Image: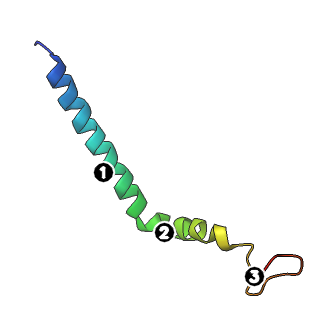
Amino acid sequence: MDLDLNSLRAGVTVLSFLAFCGVVAWALARRNQAAFDEAARLPFAGESASPSEGEPR
């Protein structure tokens, strides 16, 4: 079997697409939703409703 450069490129493309589909499936899995929701709230964890003393307004 003669493996040329175009066959290698096609194989890498297919593997990359499968890896992409795997990442999308992992990101959308319901079992990960709680962890992602918690991570999404991290930037706001230290903020309060009113500015504390010593901070510029």
Q: Residues within 10 Å of mark 2 (few under 14, many from 20)?
A: few
Q: CA distance from mark 2 to mark 3?
A: 25 Å
Position above or below: 11 against 51: above
Q: Amino acid at mark 3?
A: Ser
The answer to whether the residue labelled 1 contacts the one labelled 2, judged by CB atoms less than 8 Å apart, is no
Assess disc 3: are there few (<14), some (14-19) or many (≥20) residues with their C-alpha within 10 Å of its C-alpha.
few
**Pick the front one: 46 or 1:** 46
Residue 28 position, x and y percent, is 39, 64
What residue is drawn where x is 89% and y is 76%? 54
Alpha carbon of mark 1 to alpha carbon of mark 2: how far? 18 Å
Residue name at image x 35 percent, y 56 percent: 24
In the rendered structure, which disc, 2 or 3, sits on the residue that comes first in sequence? 2
Among numbered discs 3 and 1, the one appearing first in the sequence:
1
Task: Report how far apart the C-alphas of labels 3 and 1 lie in the structure.
Answer: 39 Å
The image shows residue 39 at horizontal and vertical percentages of 59, 65
Please determine whether, in this image, residue 3 is positioned above or below residue 9. Answer: above
Q: Residues within 10 Å of mark 1 (few under 14, many from 20)?
A: few
Instruction: Count all numbered tags in the image, as a single digit.
Output: 3
Q: Quadrant of residue 38?
A: bottom right
Image location of residue 53, percent across then percent down: 89, 81
1 in relation to 47, above or below? above
Residue found farthest to the top: 2
* Residue of label 3: 48
Identify residue for label 1: 21
Identify residue for label 2.
Answer: 33
Q: Amino acid at mark 2?
A: Gln
Q: In the structure shown, which secondary structural element does the residue marked by tag 2 occupy?
A: helix
Horizontal placement of 16 versus 47: left or right? left
